[in-house]
Amino acid sequence: MKSRAFGLMAASLLIAPECVLATPSAFATAFTTSTTTTYNNIYTPPVISNIQTYSTELIAEMQGGTVLYDQTFTVPYSDPSVSTAALGVAQGLLTGDGAASILGPNLLSNNTSLLSSVSVTGSPIFVSSDAATATTAYVGPQTIYVGANQADPFVLLAGQTDYDTLITSVITQDIPTNTTDTYLTTQVYELIGVPAPSTVPEPDTLSLWGAAVMAFGLVRRRRVVASTSD
């Protein structure tokens, strides 16, 4: 009997410590850390780039006549392909058509308009950061979220306490913007060929001369008749 009682006592001593150790775990205190990050974006005035495009038209025509040359170029008039090469061709056509002199080139129209505006946002540029710390006690049963950006669930059993330290960061960054504006300048230039003065009398002038000659002949004839009668 004594040996059996001793065995039961020994067994109870081996089992009892497990029960004693399991009980405090339900009331254990935990310490966790959480973080959140907030971005404060600032936008500086955009950097604007301008792109100039051109439509330059060169017209050559005889005074009061037909158009001999009409070409449009995607460069300004100052470009040698217009002010030298194209201008030379146009002048040659006017001269070949009988122009004694050439007027121009004269600027007939000049207009500039915005074709497009495209904005592109660049990568954020770090400016500054501020951090604040706060500790909160949570008592179970409940589930809280801890870790980076408070993304990890943490289960508190009944009677458990967790002291969570939350670090809140505010990062200020500059968001750069680049804007590209495209403009179109449209210009029209004109050359006028002036023909040489005509040496042939106009029809009205010939008629006047003919009438004058006839009148002079009649007067002279009358004088001759009168003198013969006398």
Image (cartoon, rainbow, N blue to C red):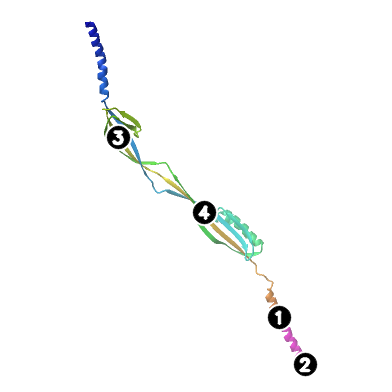
Three-letter code for the amino acid on which mark 4 is drawn: Leu
Return the residue at label 1. Answer: 211
Nearest to N terminus: mark 2 or mark 1:
1
Look at discs 4 and 3 and give the one toward the viewer.
3
Kindly identify the residue that appears in the image at 52 percent across and 52 percent down: 53
Give the position of the N terminus as an image quadrant: top left
Three-letter code for the amino acid on which mark 2 is drawn: Ser
Q: Give the range drawn in magenta.
A: 209-230
Look at discs 4 and 1 and give the one toward the viewer.
4
Assign a secondary structure to mark 4.
strand
Q: Distance between the residues labelled 2 and 1?
A: 27 Å
Return the residue at label 3. Answer: 166
Three-letter code for the amino acid on which mark 1 is drawn: Ala
Three-letter code for the amino acid on which mark 3 is drawn: Leu
Assign a secondary structure to mark 1.
helix
Q: Residue furthest left?
A: 2
* Residue 226 position (above or below residue 176): below
Kindly identify the residue that appears in the image at 34 percent across and 30 percent down: 153
Look at discs 2 and 1 and give the one toward the viewer.
1
Nearest to N terminus: mark 2 or mark 4:
4
- Confirm whether the magenta stretch covers residue 104: no
Return the residue at label 2. Answer: 229
Question: Which mark, residue 125?
Answer: none
- Confirm whether the magenta stretch covers residue 210: yes
